[in-house]
Image (tube, rainbow, N blue to C red):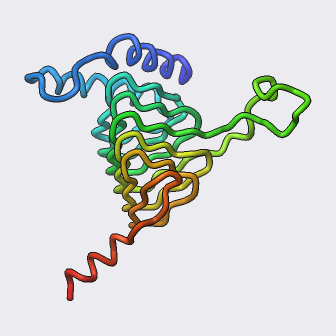
Amino acid sequence: MKKLKKLIGYLFYHLFAGNLPHYGLGRSWKLSKKLRAFCGKLMFDRCGKDLDLGRRVSLSTRIEIGDRSGIGDRSWIHGKVIIGDDVMMGPECVMLTANHNMARTDIPMNRQGDGEEKPVRIGNDVWLGARVIVLPGVTIGDGAVIGAGSVVTKDVPPYCVAAGNPARVIRDRRAAEKKTEN
């Protein structure tokens, strides 16, 4: 029954709800948002309250997402991905959970299959800018900010700002907080 529910949510999203308007087109976008959130409740392993699921997103049904979190338009999320509460995700973000095997040179890489799946974990209160790419096994800590266009190859500590390709920590958000207290 659970697989059927996931299939119905997946098909309804991809054939209908994922193509509806997002923001700014009268009141119709509010209904669109509710329909896409309903699809998320059906298809995801876990779906919190007030999901903001963007348009034309390519999705796995193995996503766990917390309350008040969003997935940006045209994002690509496959495999086991765990997203916390209050996460903002810009458009066209990509989350990868596996790579191709390439260890052998006597067999073409496209025939070696996929490597071991390594889930991606996104903490609470995280902001991913537009076109962020997160590689397999990466954990992004609570309160982190990832700059637009970054490629996250390693874990990002909580409350840090990271940017670049590969993404590097450029500052700690808590340091700015301490300066304003003094």
Pinpoint residue 160: horizontal percent, then vertical percent. Answer: 41, 66
Q: In this view, does 134 lie above or below 180?
A: above
The answer to whether residue 166 is left or right of residue 171 is right
Judged from this view, the residue extending furthest toward the left is: 26
The residue that appears at 45% across and 49% down in the rendered structure is 150
Q: Quarter of the image containing the N terminus? A: top right
The answer to whether residue 107 is left or right of residue 64 is right
Q: Is residue 42 above or below residue 69?
A: above
User: What is the total number of numbered labels drawn onto the structure image?
Assistant: 0
Q: Which of 155/102 is in front?
A: 102
Q: Quarter of the image containing the C terminus? A: bottom left
Q: Which of 10/54 is in front?
A: 54
Give the image quarter of residue 8: top left
Q: Which of 161/70 is in front?
A: 161
Q: Which of 24/166 is in front?
A: 166
Pinpoint residue 91: horizontal percent, then vertical percent. Answer: 34, 35
Judged from this view, the residue extending furthest toward the bottom is: 182
The residue that appears at 33% across and 75% down in the rendered structure is 174
Q: In this view, does 27 lie above or below 15?
A: below
The residue that appears at 49% across and 43% down in the rendered structure is 133
The residue that appears at 52% across and 29% down in the rendered structure is 60
Q: Is residue 66 above or below residue 11?
A: below
Pinpoint residue 39: horizontal percent, then vertical percent. Answer: 37, 24
